[in-house]
Amino acid sequence: MTLCAIMYASIDFSLERMDVAVKCPYCAHLESKVVDSRPADEGSSIRRRRECLACRKRFTTYEIMESLPLMVIKRDGSRQAFDRNKLMGSMLKSCEKRSVPISTLERLAAEIEQSLQNEMEREVPTTEIGELVMDKLKDVDEVSYVRFASVYRQFKDINTFMAELTKLLEEK
């Protein structure tokens, strides 16, 4: 029988053996050895098979990176937690009736979120997120890009819309 223990807290490393102090789910002994280690969840975590040094039973742990909450500063100055589902929803709306696979949009959303996390800024304005989305959509589907830009940039009239289209054509 395999038990999965997920390690969310900080990890105690022993410098001599590079073992991690994880309590055995069977006997609660604190010493175990890593039998196998491999990436999991597309590289976002590490799966480790461990063997307890006391009872010799094996168990699995997952080591994941702790991410700090990301706050979005809205145009009106209010703040709310970053929500990947909202990001996906806005991209799905702009790609409606287009041949853009959902898996592509999920990948773009993950890339955008990772990019924001890598910046180490805990508060990000919606303008920065919108620009990242437009940069990604431009390479995937130009019509979706223009749809997103028309809502995001709040085009007031046909002239501002045409200026954006002209800029897009000049970049090609």
Image (cartoon, rainbow, N blue to C red):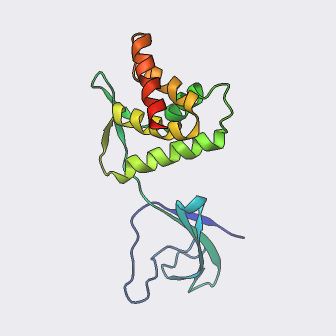
Placement of 7 over or under 89, stated as above or below: below
Most foreground residue, 103 or 137:
137
Res. 155 image quadrant? top left
Left or right of residue 44: residue 71: left
> Who's the residue at 41% across and 33% down the image?
130
The mark tally for this picture is 0
In the image as oriented, which residue stretches furthest toward the bottom? 16
Q: Going by the image, does 75 lie left or right of 115?
A: left
Q: Is residue 165 above or below residue 155?
A: below
What residue sits 29% from the left and 47% below the top? Answer: 121
Q: Is residue 154 above or below residue 110?
A: above
Q: Nearer the viewer, residue 5 or 100?
A: 100
- From the viewer's perspective, is residue 36 above or below residue 142? below
Which residue sits at x=39%, y=22%? 153
Residue 38 visible? The answer is yes
Q: Image quadrant for the N terminus? A: bottom right
Measuring from the top left, give residue 167's x and y in whole percent: 42, 29
For this rendering, which residue is in front, 25 or 76?
A: 76
- The residue located at (56%, 26%) in the rendering is 94
Locate residue 165, reporting x and y percent. Answer: 47, 24
Q: Is residue 99 left or right of residue 78?
A: right
- Examine the rendering and report whether any part of residue 83 can be seen: no
